[in-house]
Amino acid sequence: MAQPTSPRAQSIVAAILAAGLLLVAGPVVAHAQRGWLPRLQLDNDVYNFWTRHTQRPDEEYTNGVQASLESLTAPGWGGLFARAIPDCAGSGGGAPCRSTMLTLGQDLYTPNLDRAPFLVEDWEDERPYFAWLYLRGSARVSSARSLRTTSVSLGVTGPPALGELAQRIAHRIGFNEQATGWETQVGFEPGAILELRQAVLAGGVGGERRLAMDLVPEGAVSLGNVRSHAELGATARVGWNLSHPWHPGAWRGRGQAEWWLSAGGRAEYVARDMSLDGTWRDPSRRVERIAGVRQYEFAAGLRYEGLSVTYRAVTRSREYRTGPGHHTYSSMVFGFVPLR
C-alpha cells in the first residue's frame, strides 16, 4: 500500500520542480515580450465519440493534459542545441531556425474500474494505478524539410503527482463512478526522461494548389527511469490550403481557412515503462510488459486566422500480457500560430 508523502519526498519534489523552472522557465520569461505560441492537448478515452457514452472505456491510458508554450526566439538553454542557427521569430522561407517549448503535463493510467484492486481475484495482474506529473523543456530545430526535437522531462510519480485528486475531480464533474484503489498506485520516485525525435517531410505540401498532401516519416528514442523506448513511424496528411506541418517560415498567410485529414502508424520497442514496471526502488506493483507495441491513429483538423483545433483517435496494441488486446483514446488539441 502506498504511504503518505514524507517531508523528505516533498523536499525532493520541490527541488525537482525548482530546478526545472530555473532551467527552462526563467530564460523563457525574460523573452516573453517577443510572443508565445500556446497549445493545449487533452487526452481521454471519454472522447471516443463514435461509441455510446456508457460504453466508452475508462482504463489504461485514461487521461492526459499537456499545456505548452513555444517561444520562436529559442531563449536560454534551447539555444545551446543550435548555437549557429537563427531564431524562428525572424526566419523566412524554408531556412533552418530554432525555437523552445515548455510543457507542463500530467498522465494518468488506471485498470478497468470494474476490475479495480480488491474487487476481483488476481487484481494484481491488472494495470497498476499510475500518475506522472512533469515539466518538459524542448529545443526544436526546424527547416522546410526536417524537424529535430531534443526534450528533457523532470517530474514525480506516486502521490505527489496528484493522480487520485485529478481523477476524483474529473469524475465528479462528469458524474462517473469514483475510482477505488489509488492507495495501491505505483509509488513515489523522482523521474527524468531525455528524448531525441527526428521528423522529415518526404512530400511537399503542394505549393499554391488548393488540395495538397504530404508524408512525414519520424523516429524517436528516449532514455529515463520513467520511460525508455525507440520508435519508427509515419503520418500522411491531405487537406485544403494545407500549411507546413511545423516550420514557421512556411506557414500560410491570413484570410485562408484550412482543413486536413491524417492517418499514421508507428512501431515501438519499449525497454522500460514505469506505469507497468513499477519504480526502481520498489517494483512491487508491476505486470509483465510486452516490449513490442504498435500504434495507429486518425485525425482531422481545422485552422483559421492562426487558431487551430485537431481531433485525433489513437489505438495501441496490447502492452502487457494480461492487458486488453488494444486500447483506444482520443485527443482534443487547441493551438495558435502567428500568420503572415
Image (cartoon, helix red, strand yellow):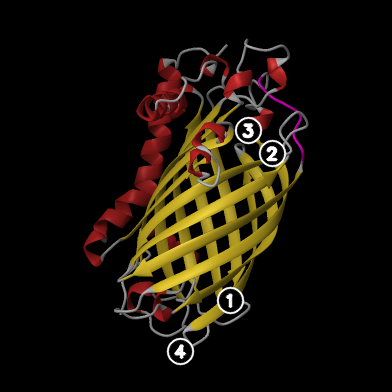
Q: Main secondary structure of the magenta part?
A: loop
Residue placed under numbered mark 3 in the picture: 274
Left or right of 214 in this view: 177: left
In primary-sequence order, the first of circles 1 and 2 is 1
Front: mark 3 or 1: 1
Left or right of 154 in this view: 334: left
How crowded pointer 4 is (Cα within 10 Å; few <14, some 14-19, many 20+) is rated as: few
**Which quadrant: the C terminus?**
bottom left
In primary-sequence order, the first of circles 2 and 4 is 4
At a point 58% along the width and 58% down the height, the residue shown is: 298
- Does residue 169 appear in the picture of this structure? yes
Q: Nearer the viewer, residue 273 or 82?
A: 273
- Relative to residue 27, is residue 187 depicted above or below? above
Part of the protein shown in magenta: 285-290
Residue placed under numbered mark 4 in the picture: 208
- Does residue 186 appear in the picture of this structure? no
Task: Tell whether position 79 is magenta.
Answer: no
Q: The residue tagged with tag 4: helix, strand or loop?
A: loop
The disc at residue 322 is: none
| Badge 2 vs badge 3, beta-carbon distance below 8 Å | yes
In primary-sequence order, the first of circles 3 and 1 is 1
Q: Amino acid at mark 4?
A: Glu
User: Which residue extends farthest front?
Assistant: 52
Residue placed under numbered mark 1 in the picture: 214
Q: The residue tagged with tag 2: helix, strand or loop?
A: strand
Q: Amino acid at mark 2?
A: Arg
